[in-house]
Amino acid sequence: IFEELDYLNEANNAKIFAKLYSTKNGISIKSLPNGEGVIVPEIIESLCTKNVIVMEWIDGSKLTSISNDNVSLLDGSAEEMRQENLALVEKALYVTLSQLLDTGVMHADPHGGNLLKVSTPSPTSSNSKPHKEQRRRRRLSKKLHSATSHFKKD
């Protein structure tokens, strides 16, 4: 359990997971359905310590966020969303099984906050440019880095 509390170790595990399963050329994605990887947040090593892990923010919706309040039941979109989410849960199961059976590397924290459905715009779409919110987060991250750079790293 103490390894779980060492965030430098967790950051390293996340980087290994990304090398295996990331959509950014993960080496084990061929073992997954359709050969598609998963989106893995990048670790910001310069801000990580034994007690703090900092990673890229990923915008998305929880796979459990379907409710009558946010989806119209009349047009069938709720069922469509359920099917999309179930396909993503199935993909998560394949990744978990691949870790156990193929690579022997197990890194998992599968809860609703970590399993997100994200939209992935095509490289040619105008949505591929950083949004105002993403730029704001980057500026805030840089300010946080400057404000905390004097703290001793463990």
Image (spheres, grey):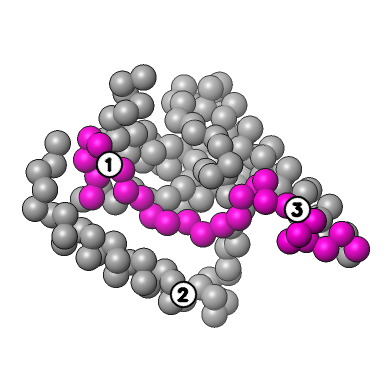
Work out whether mark 3 precedes mark 1 in sequence or the reverse, and give the earlier one: 1
> Looking at the image, which residue is at 84% across and 52% down?
79
Q: Nearer the viewer, mark 2 or mark 1?
A: 1
Q: Amino acid at mark 1?
A: Val
**Location of residue 62 in the rendering, given as x and y in whole percent from the top left corner:** 61, 50
Q: Secondary structure at mark 1?
A: loop
Per the rendering, the mark at residue 112 is: none
Q: Which residue is mark 3?
A: 67
Image: magenta residue range: 47-74
99 or 51, nearer to the observer: 51
Per the rendering, the mark at residue 52 is: 1
Q: Secondary structure at mark 3?
A: loop
Q: Amino acid at mark 3?
A: Ser
Label 2, label 1: how far apart the Cα atoms are: 27 Å
Q: Which quadrant is home to the N terminus? A: top left
> Looking at the image, which residue is at 42% across and 50% down?
41
**Location of residue 53 in the rendering, given as x and y in whole percent from the top left corner:** 31, 43
Residue 64 counted in the magenta span: yes
Asked whether, in this view, residue 2 is left or right of residue 145, the answer is right
Compared with residue 37, is residue 68 higher up or lower down, i.e. above or below?
A: below
Asked whether, in this view, residue 39 is left or right of residue 57, the answer is right
Q: Is residue 25 visible?
A: no
Main secondary-structure element of the magenta-colored stretch: loop
Q: Secondary structure at mark 2?
A: loop
